[in-house]
Amino acid sequence: MRLFFKGIIHVFCWFLFLFYTSAYCQSNTQIRGFVDASATYSSNGLFFSLGEQDLFITSDISDRLSFLGETVFKFDPFSETNFSVSIERIILKYNILGNHNILFGKHHTPVNYWNDTYHHGRVFFPTISRPLLFSSELFPLHTTGVSIQGLNLGPLKFGYDIMFGNGLGSTDVMDNDSYKSITLAGHIKPTNTLRIGVSYYHDVIDKGVELHNGQVMAWRLEENLVTGSIASFGKNVEFLVESMAGVTHTDSTGTRKSLSSYIYAGYKATEKIIPYIRYDNLRFQEGELGFHKNNTSSYLAGIRYQINYLAVIKLEYQHQRSEMLSPVNTVSTQFAIGF
């Protein structure tokens, strides 16, 4: 209950902030929302589920200063009300010079194309859900800190991100250890539909730190992630492949390596219908203590019906195999909208 009221207070303060800037700073403020609902059939039967309700706010406070806020309302079985409020992003962006910006707040860590491009509005996802590599316990989905960013530089439209912030063992308001995470990312856009990117992420989690999933680190762990991606979303063909190599080190087991990859392809059969496929593969070295070792592969085929830019229906079949569970076959459908 306390978490719920804290979230409401955060949202209320945002509205006060936006009201002030609208009234006195003549800001250009936009408020959007996104929501989705789904149905899934598997060997456990048929069930329906409510997705996230996303409140998305942007505001141009001045010619150089802008604000972005994203708050998600979602089901939480551990909450007293069964629902919780999550502040996903709060970003203050100041334009330094030309296409170079400095950003302060809570960000989506720019470690790969998916995390850097898609926010919590499922209407924009090419598939129903995120790739499996996002399920890794040590994937840095968010970072609270400061970053310098450059976009569309030179003929290849080079872009970069240099981020310094609280690491994986942190909360939105404090860091639980003295270490800070570092993210270095770069990409080029040779054409308007092609983006090629690489990134490096480094963090250290101290012994005794509690992670977001409740796991308490029994050892000091050093993590290094290297990611590469190629994304092409053309007029008819959609293609996205990303791979993340993870190297963790502890005094207990030494250095261990993991590899998480996925490949997505879609074809625009008509203006509104896009059939697609996706393959996911997670591989972890024996003795891995950072990531949850559960080698997994998944095959997915689906079709996306785009009613318009802000209304999409998706239908998917997925076959998933892992070393710890029996093979699972599911059929899912999702209706996602923006408003």
Image (cartoon, rainbow, N blue to C red):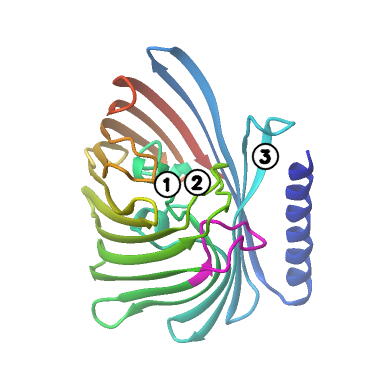
Q: Could you tell me residue 283's position as x and y percent?
A: 25, 42
Judging by the rendered image, the residue that carries numbered circle 3 is: 84
> Circles 3 and 2: CB distance less than 8 Å?
no
What element does badge 1 sit on?
Answer: helix
| Residue type at tag 1 | Phe
Identify the residue at horizontal 39%, vertical 56% (top origin): 251
On screen, residue 202 above or below 292: below
Q: Is residue 102 magenta?
A: no
What element does badge 2 sit on?
Answer: loop
Determine the CA span between mark 1 and mark 2: 6 Å
| Residue type at tag 3 | Ser
Q: Mark 2 packing: few (<14 Cα in 10 Å), some, or many (20+)?
A: many
Identify the residue at horizontal 53%, vertical 55% (top origin): 207
Left or right: 246 in relation to 85 = left
Q: Could you tell me residue 141's position as x and y percent?
A: 47, 54
Judging by the rendered image, the residue that carries numbered circle 1 is: 124
Q: Which quarter of the rendered picture does the N terminus lie within?
A: top right
In the rendering, which numbered label is found on residue 121? 2
Start-end of magenta stretch: 164-179
Q: Main secondary structure of the magenta part?
A: loop
> Circles 1 and 2: CB distance less than 8 Å?
yes
Determine the CA span between mark 3 and mark 1: 23 Å
